[in-house]
Amino acid sequence: MATTMSFSLKPNQALNCVSNLKTSSLSFKGISFSSIRLNPATRRLSITCAAKPETVSKVCDIVKKQLALSVETEVCGESKFAALGADSLDTVEIVMGLEEEFGISVEEDSAQSITTVQDAADLIEDLISKKA
């Protein structure tokens, strides 16, 4: 669930406005940040850039194919592999399909941390950027 915020305050005032917020999205000068987290202990914002929509879309297609899901089954960035019926072997096959499609190699420890489509897409873009 995304939350949209729009305000023009000084940085310290903005932080006070979002102090109860856990995760949100932000678009700034045409650049979209799909995951913003507030660490309540330090009251600092952490902004992470999510994968491109086309990468997420490709991952969705691969997941649907690997799990033999029907066309009507909705798969999006927040979709968890387990909720889609994937077991550990299915997840390994999904990762292998992603490696083949994107020309990357996923380390075993990284593969074990992938639980959602968005996790996979973010990891793919990270690996591609390191490869370049």
Image (cartoon, helix red, strand yellow):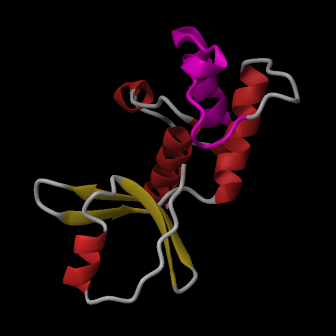
Residue 37 appears in which quarter of the rendering? bottom left
Q: Position of residue 42 (x, y in %)?
A: 11, 60
Question: In terms of depth relative to the viewer, which is nearer, 34 or 49?
Answer: 34
Residue 35 showing in the rendered view: no
Residue 87 shown in magenta = yes
Q: Position of residue 73 (x, y in %)?
A: 80, 28
Numbered label tally = 0
Asked if 84 appears above or below 26 in the picture, the reply is above
Q: Is residue 27 left or right of residue 85?
A: left
Q: Is residue 101 left or right of residue 38?
A: right
Helix, strand or loop for the magenta stretch, by majority:
helix
Q: Is residue 52 left or right of residue 110?
A: right
Question: In terms of depth relative to the viewer, which is nearer, 130 or 109?
Answer: 109
First to last magenta residue range:
75-100
Report the residue at 21% width, 55% height from top. 39
Q: Position of residue 97 (x, y in %)?
A: 66, 29
Residue 26 showing in the rendered view: yes
Asked if 43 appears above or below 109 in the picture, the reply is below
Question: In terms of depth relative to the viewer, which is nearer, 19 or 76?
Answer: 19
Q: Is residue 126 left or right of residue 117?
A: left
Residue 99 shown in magenta = yes
Residue 89 appears in which quarter of the rendering? top right
Report the residue at 71% width, 35% height from top. 75
